[in-house]
Amino acid sequence: MDPRIEIIDKLSNFLQLRLDGRKPLIGIVLGSGLGKLADFIKDPLVIPYGVLPGFPVSTAIGHKGNFIVGELGGKCVIAMQGRIHFYEGYGMDKVVLPIRLMISTGIKTLIVSNAAGGVGFSLHVGDLMVIKDHINLLPNPLIGPNLDRFGPRFPDMTRPYDPSLIHLAEKIAAQEGITLRKGVYVGGTGPSYETPAEYKFYRHIGGDAVGMSTVPEVIVARHAGIPVFGISVITNEAHDEYADDYENDGNDVVEAANAAAGKMTVLIEKMIEQIQL
């Protein structure tokens, strides 16, 4: 048996015992500074990553490192309060292990969020950008022997972000008075922030926002046929003009994400209420 499958099965069995009969239908990945959404999950069951045997532990700023299982928007959800990043030194199999574990628990939809730098000139700090497509500059998590149990060798990526979920988000945002932007997310390795020349390059190749995560998670979800909705909170403006003393700072990123967490929470909770499974 593929050792990756052995690890997934072992963790899935362990997690199923912890779930005590709960059956999550929607998986949620909460990025930097966005873990507050977990506070709105009713009857929460908290499972720290550290209690799962062999599971990677999140070390990034603003990532608490818990699975939260409970009710949100009238449905059972499993939320990652902090993700695993490639830049933390984990191999790509570990980075996407949480997603494959959530798939093994039976989720039918995945919602991913992140903090990102706004490469497009129209994006500003605090904006919510629905991800309509991505550009992957990270190692592809499907490299290596294919896990046939999850999906085909060559999965289609024509629509990595589900059009019907994007339409639902736009409808709810209009009803709630929430302004949404829409754009292409560029996923890089990090952990260093990008140079001004790199920001300009990403804009020229079609990127609107840039970050250090998300894309591998989306790829393995789509490999398994799971519909995905993605959203970025713009936490800094990656434009062309910078003051002489300007610096990107991780704590500032988390603070900006926290400030936008309220409207993102409203949007995601309303979406979960209306998602048809």
Image (cartoon, rainbow, N blue to C red):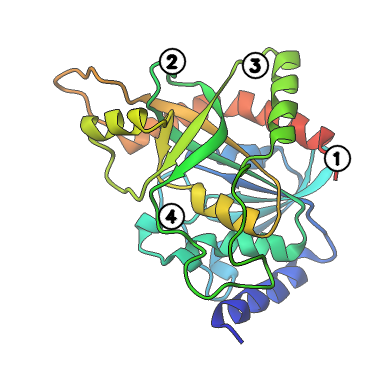
How crowded is the residue under tag 1: few (<14 C-alpha within 10 Å), some, or many (20+)?
few
Say what secondary structure mark 2 lies in. loop
Percent coordinates x, y for residue 29 in the rendering:
60, 47
Label 2 to label 4, Cα distance in Å?
28 Å
Residue 180 appears in view: yes
Say what secondary structure mark 4 lies in. loop
> Based on the displayed image, in which of its 4 quarters is residue 35 positioned?
top right
Out of 63 and 193, give the one closest to the viewer: 193
Say what secondary structure mark 3 lies in. loop
Left/right of residue 67 with respect to residue 176 in the rendered view: left
Q: Residue at x 58, y 83 (%)?
A: 2
Residue linked to disc 2: 122
Give the quarter of the figure containing the N terminus. bottom right
Q: Earlier in the sequence, mark 3 or mark 1?
A: 3
Label 3 to label 2, Cα distance in Å?
16 Å
Residue linked to disc 4: 85
Under mark 3, the amino acid is Ile
Out of 133 and 237, give the one closest to the viewer: 133
Under mark 1, the amino acid is Gln
Under mark 4, the amino acid is His
Label 1 to label 2, Cα distance in Å?
33 Å
Percent coordinates x, y for residue 192 in the rendering:
27, 45
Q: Earlier in the sequence, mark 4 or mark 1?
A: 4
Residue linked to disc 1: 276
